[in-house]
Amino acid sequence: MMFNRTFAALADPNRQAIINALRAKEQPVSAIAENLNITLATLSHHLDILKRAELISARRSGRQIFYSLNMSVFEEISEYLIKFIDKKKKN
Amino acid sequence: MMFNRTFAALADPNRQAIINALRAKEQPVSAIAENLNITLATLSHHLDILKRAELISARRSGRQIFYSLNMSVFEEISEYLIKFIDKKKKN
DNA sequence: TTGATATTTAGATATATATCTAATTATATC
DNA sequence: GATATAATTAGATATATATCTAAATATCAA
């Protein structure tokens, strides 16, 4: 496997909600917070976990920090799973 | 998302090792245990988590219980990710 | 430079999880 | 039935994680 940290990052409903929020477009923390019932401190913690897993990236613009999805890791998991399933079918 | 429980099940190195062990063929608990440095009790606990996530299935044969990969959930995640990536590309 | 806004960091706490040893259940064999 | 083998369940514990409040940092605007 190998996607240990990635799967751990995906295994939380608040983090899944964050990912869904970022699906349409990049968002500042305040906008992401609107969909969630957690404090900004907690949100910040979840953003950190997603960032460490390289699932999202951050850029500052003025006082705001915009987060966006980083698709490459999603693509890597997807490729891995396709190969995994494919090899299995050949058994 | 939705694959909350699935991702949590995948987010542990011992469980990833179990999945790898089952990749080639179904195995009794004793055989799976050989690759791992944990007690049978702990292994049993991990098998339970993977079973609840529907990633593996069990069948008893005599005194042994054989576990095998259940590919359908892997396929569902894969499909989900492909759609996720695809929609993103169309943005 | 003072004040307001946006976010993160520090520190505390409660819950969840991984792990162990010991006991239990299920099956097979004698 | 008694004993051995295969695995699970119960109960305890230590570590990790999610969450909060309060304090700190960064940026902008007056």
Image (cartoon, coloured by chain):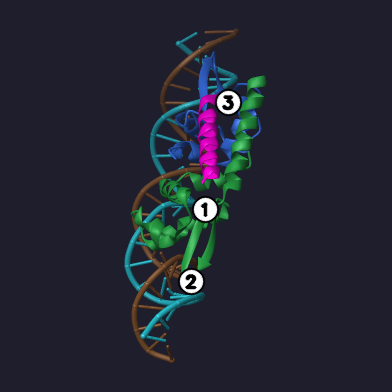
Chain colours: A blue, B green, C cyan, D brown
Q: Residues within 10 Å of mark 1 (few under 14, many from 20)?
A: many
Q: Is residue A77 magenta?
A: yes
**Percent x, y of residue D21:** 52, 39
Residue that appears at 63% across and 36% down: B80
Of label 1 and label 2, which has the lower sequence position? 1
What is the secondary structure assignment of the residue under circle 2?
loop
Discs 1/2, front: 2
Tell me the tag on residue A29. Answer: 3
- Which residue type carries mark 1? Leu
| Residues tagged by mark 1 and mark 2 found on one chain of the structure | yes
- Which residue type carries mark 2? Gly
Residue that appears at 57% across and 47% down: B71
- Quadrant in the picture for the N terminus of chain B: top right
Q: Which residue is mark 2?
A: B62
Discs 1/3, front: 1
Residue that appears at 52% across and 36% down: A83
What is the secondary structure assignment of the residue under circle 3?
helix
Instruction: Give the spatial CA distance, label 1 vs label 2.
Output: 22 Å
**Percent x, y of residue A46:** 52, 34
Tell me the tag on residue B80. Answer: none
Q: Which residue is mark 1?
A: B50
